[in-house]
Structures are given as C-alpha cells and as structure tokens.
Amino acid sequence: MDTSASSSSDVRPIAKSLDPPPHSAQQTVPRKLAVLSALAMLMFLSSLSLTSVTSITAKLGYKLHNQSLDSWITTTYLVAFTAIIPSVGKLSDVFGRRWPLAGFSTLFLVGSIICGAAGKMNTMLAGRAVAGIGGGGLFTLTVIIASDLARPRQRTRLLGVLGAAWALGIGAGPAVAGNLLRHNWRWLFYMNAFILVFALALAYLAMGAATPARSANLWHVDYVGMVLMAGCVTALVLALNYGGDLYAWSSGVVIALLILAAVLFGAFGYYEAKFAKDPIFPAGLLRSTNARIIVAMQPFIGIAVYCPVFYVAKWSEIVKNESPATAGSHLIAFMLAAMATSIASGVSTSFTGEYKFQIAVSAVLLTVGNGLMLEYKESISNGAQIGFLIILGIGAGFTMPTHVTCIQSAMDTADMAAATSSLFLFQFFGAAIGIALYSIINEAVLIAKLATVALQHVIYSKYILMSADNIQVIRLPEISATVRDAVIHANVQAMHSTFIAGVIFACAAVPLSLLIKHKLISKDAL
C-alpha cells in the first residue's frame, strides 16, 4: 500500500507503535492465555454491572422502600464509571498495571458487597458509586493490559476476545438479574465477589512482576486534571438526569450544575494547556487525523450501542408485560451476534491488517439497527425482534477490536494507555448523555400522549396518568382493554421518539467513519 499520501503525523506514531511493550516478551504463551482469561472475566463483570439492573430497577426500588430513586441505581454506576476513565491510562503508566488493577478490583468488590447488603436506597446508591469507579477502571485497564501482551497484529485477536466478553456481560446482564430476582436479588451483587477474586488471583499469578513504563513517582500524576475532568463529567450527567426528574429544568440545582460543568471544562482545558506537565489527554490525539476522528465518533457510538440495549428490556416489560427474566432474555440475540462479530473482526484484522472498512460497516449497521427499533410495535413477532437485534449486535461487535486498534495505531507506544482511556471516556460520556436524553424525550412525549388518552377516557384518567410511573396500574381488572391498549400505544409512541433520536446520532458516526485514513498494520507487526 502506498503511504506517501498520509501525513507525517500519522505515519510516525504507527512505526513507533510496532515496538513491543517492554514486558511483553517476558510472558510465555500459557501465561498470556491465563492473563487474557482473567482479563475477560474482569471485562465481563464490569460490563455486566452496566446493564444487569436495567430490567429490575423498579423491583429493587420496591424492595428498598424508595421507588422515587430507583432509576439512580443505573445512573449512579454509569456516572462513576465514566468519571474515572480518563484517569486510568495515566495511573497505569505511572504505577504499572498491577497496582491499579488491584485498586480498582478492590473498589468494585467493596461496592458490590455494599450493594448486596443494602437495606436502604441510599446505601445501594453509595455501593453503586464505589462499584462504578472500580468497574470503569477495570473496563479500561483490561484493554490496556491486553494491549501490552502482543504486537498490533496479534493484539487485535486479544481485543476481539475482550469484545466478546464485553458483549456477554452487556447482553446477559438483564437476563441474569431477572432470574436472580426470582430467588434472591442480593446474589446479583455477591456473585461478583467470587468471580472477581478468582480472576484477580489468576491475573496476578500469570502477569509476573511487570515493570512500570516510568518510575512510580506520585508527582507524575495529573491530579488537578483528573479532578477537573471527573467533576465536569459528573456535573453534566447529573444535571441531565436531575432535570425533569428530581428537579424542574428551571430549578437552581440543574442550572447550577450546568454552569459548574461548563466552568470545570474551561478550567480543565486551560490547566492542561498551560500548567499540566503530563496531560491526561496525550498531544498525539490532536496531531493524528485518525485519532481525532475515532475519538470524535465515540459519543455517537456510545449512544447508538448502549441506549437501545437499555431500552429493549423496558419495552418488553411495558408493551408485552413480560417478566424481568423474559424481557432480559431478548438481548441474547444481540449478545451472540456481538460476541461472534468481535472475535471474527479481531481475527480478520490480524490477518489483513485492515480496520477502516470494518469501522465504516459498523457505523452503517448501528444506524440500520437503531432504525429498525422503530419497527418495535405491539404486534412485532419474536423472530423480527431477534433479527433486528442481530443486526444491532453485529454493528456493536465491530467496535472494540477496530476502534481500539485505530487509536492505538495512531499513537506512540508511551501514549497508548492514555489514548485508550480517552477513547472510552468519550464513548461512555456519549452513552451517559444519550441515556439521559432518551429518558427526557421518552418522559416528555409519554406525558403528552397520556394526557390525550386521559381526555378521551375521563373515567379512567387517574389510572392513565398514574401509569407513567407504574405501568401495572392499567392491568388492574377494572381497567378496560380499550384503555389498556391506548396507554400501551402511548408508551410505544414515546419510545419511538427516543429511537428516532438514536438513529440521528448513529447517522452522525457514518460520515466520520469514512474520513478515517486507510492504512494497513504492517506484516512486520506479526
């Protein structure tokens, strides 16, 4: 392939990235397989906790005697998960991989135990916050460690395996939670402890004594930058989740949070540019065209992948009146498709060295998959649901191996970990914002539609309006079938409004994917 057309800023980092990580040569094949197995289990756990409670939040709110805050069981984890991500790469560069792995594992373990033992909603939310910090760290760190184990061509296979573990966790979460709810919901959190301890022990035994990329000096850590970015992300996501839920959009709390997010973002940019000796975001992100584009895609990818996943189980429970276990099982099709695609993508890239085409195909399929969500109607068949989720799963499956490969190939080896953190920060930031926007749109449209239905059926207006918070109200024997169908249709229309937003965001990723420069990973990387 002729690379003369590529800018020098893009060519130089790829040549450097072919150098193996300093400690990878010390690992034998059995040790690498053991490490990869441990990393896959940790990836599975952190991803499982992202979606596991989505199908049972209402039930947990009832059991913890506070249904007004039940949606925050998911939101709290996602906010903490996202806020810690930008710090992970630099922490692992300064202290090596082992100590951050132990620290984030401990936080995830402690948080999970707190959640399992919770008797009140406040305790549950505190546990989810702690677990979210640990989960975000583990998610990012597993990819960084896996990237240390091999050269770029071989690395794509490992990323494909981690992508499959991610898909398994995301897809299985709601079904696992729904089934455990039948017995003892606390084991949804306690089981994390057993898997995590085993995975961490395996990783430590197999990794050996890895040498940090630089001297473990506390002064190398950009504490100010980490605090400013984490504060910015947290304030913005909280504002979008508070608005229209706990507080009115015009309330002082929401406005103050939005202003705080803007101020912290500005302060972060100024501090990083003027004072930070070792910025959180490596300078190579701005020098490389491919790095800029793939990072710019991530908010749209986060929305296109995670928002439909979060709403599938909700749709099944509301429209089909399915149990949490049955509703969660619909994601199995998504899960299997994403797992198979991720592994196939990693293997394909390891042989061909190509990832641009796969990134573009992924963006198109995610757009199509989000568009097909508009076909989710009261009369949709199980076969159609499976087919639509397979398309969405295939699109999602391409993302882990190809997007990580794209940004790592564009960066110097020394900046690889920080660049990986940057990629996931923008992806999960998009997911957090998208889920909040979905909720805002869904609530606004639903209230308007239910008000219309209530005017048409005045005698049942009390129940119709109450159904916005508890859909089971309309399934009481005294509610007529006509009213029940009208309320369900209102919910379908509201969710369709959110799916339209998903299509728009997914579409935005398509032209960006076409701007990525076509460059092969050299066969020398094998």
Image: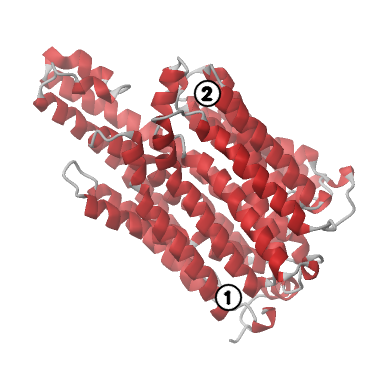
State the residue at coordinates (58%, 49%). 426
Name the kind of residue labelled 2 in the image: Val
Q: Distance between the residues labelled 1 and 2?
A: 48 Å
State the residue at coordinates (29%, 31%). 445
> Is 165 left or right of 360, judged from the image as shown?
right
Q: Earlier in the sequence, mark 1 or mark 2?
A: 2
Counting every numbered tag in the picture gives 2
Mark 1 Cα-neighbour bin, 10 Å: few <14, some 14–19, many ≥20:
many
Give percent across and percent down for residue 134. 65, 39
The residue where tag 1 is placed is 350
State the mark number for residue 254.
2
State the mark number for residue 103.
none
Mark 2 Cα-neighbour bin, 10 Å: few <14, some 14–19, many ≥20:
many
Residue 389's image quarter? bottom left
Q: In which quarter of the image is the N terminus?
A: bottom right
Q: Quadrant of the C terminus?
A: bottom right
Q: Of discs 1 and 2, which sits in the foreground? A: 1
> Is 355 left or right of 463, judged from the image as shown?
right
State the residue at coordinates (19%, 23%). 475
Q: Nearer the viewer, residue 300 or 217?
A: 217
Residue 85 shows in the view = no
Name the kind of residue labelled 1 in the image: Ser
Determine the secondary structure under disc 1.
helix
Give percent across and percent down for residue 520. 59, 79
